[in-house]
Amino acid sequence: MNTGSDERGEVAAAVKEGPEEVGAEVPETGAEAPLGSRAPQFVQARRTLHLSWQVGVFVIGLAVVGAGVMMLVLPGPGWLVIFGGMAIWATEFVWAQLVLRWTKRKVSEAAQRALDPRVRRRNMILTTVGLVIIGLLVGIYVWKFGLTMPWKIDE
C-alpha cells in the first residue's frame, strides 16, 4: 500500500469514530443523530470526491430553497419546500443541521403550546368570532348588492 491510501484510511476511520472520540459534544437525549456529513464512506475517504459531493449537495439544496422562496409569492407549498431544501443541506453541512434542529425544537414547542387547553379554548373563540364577522360582512354584501359579482356592480 502507498501512503496516500493509508491517509485515506485514517480519515475514514476518524469519520467513523463517534463524537466522543473526536471531542464533540454528545447530545444529552441520545435521540439526535451526530452532527456531520452523511456521505457514503467511499466519498468521505477521498477529499476531492467529498468536496465535489458537498458542492453537488449545496447546489441541489440551493435550487430547492430557491424554488421554495419563489413559492412564497407563487402558488405552492413554499415553507415546506424551503424546509425540504434545508433538510437536503443538513445531510452534509453542520450549520444546516443546527438550523434544522432549532426549527424542529421550536415547532414541537409550538405544537405543545397549541395543545394546552387554555390556548385551544382561546383559538376556538377567536376562530368563532372571526367566522361570525366574516358571515356578517358577507350578509351585508348580499343584502346591499344581491348575488352580483363585484366586477359587475354598477354605481
Image: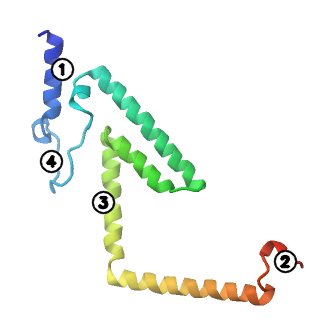
Nearer the N terminus, badge 1 or badge 3?
1
Which quarter of the figure is the C terminus placed in? bottom right
Q: CA distance from mark 2 to mark 1?
A: 76 Å
Look at the numbered disc 2 and give the secondary structure of its residue. Answer: loop
Q: Nearer the viewer, mark 3 or mark 2?
A: 2
Q: Which mark is residue 26?
A: 4
Amino acid type of disc 3?
A: Arg
Disc 1 target residue: 8
Q: Residues within 10 Å of mark 3 (few under 14, many from 20)?
A: few
Task: Please tell me in which quadrant of the rendered image residue 28 appears.
Answer: bottom left
Dot 1 surroundings within 10 Å: few (below 14), some, or many (20 or more)? some
Q: Is residue 142 above or below residue 92?
A: below
Residue 82 percent coordinates (x, y):
45, 50
> Nearer the N terminus, badge 3 or badge 4?
4
Tag 4: amino acid: Val
| Structural crowding at the residue carrying mark 2, measured as other residues with C-alpha within 10 Å and reported as few (<14), some (14–19) or many (≥20) | few
The residue indicated by pointer 2 is: 153
Going by the picture, which residue comes out furthest to the front?
147
Question: Residue at position x 79%, y 88% from top?
Answer: 144
What label does residue 110 carry, if any?
Answer: none
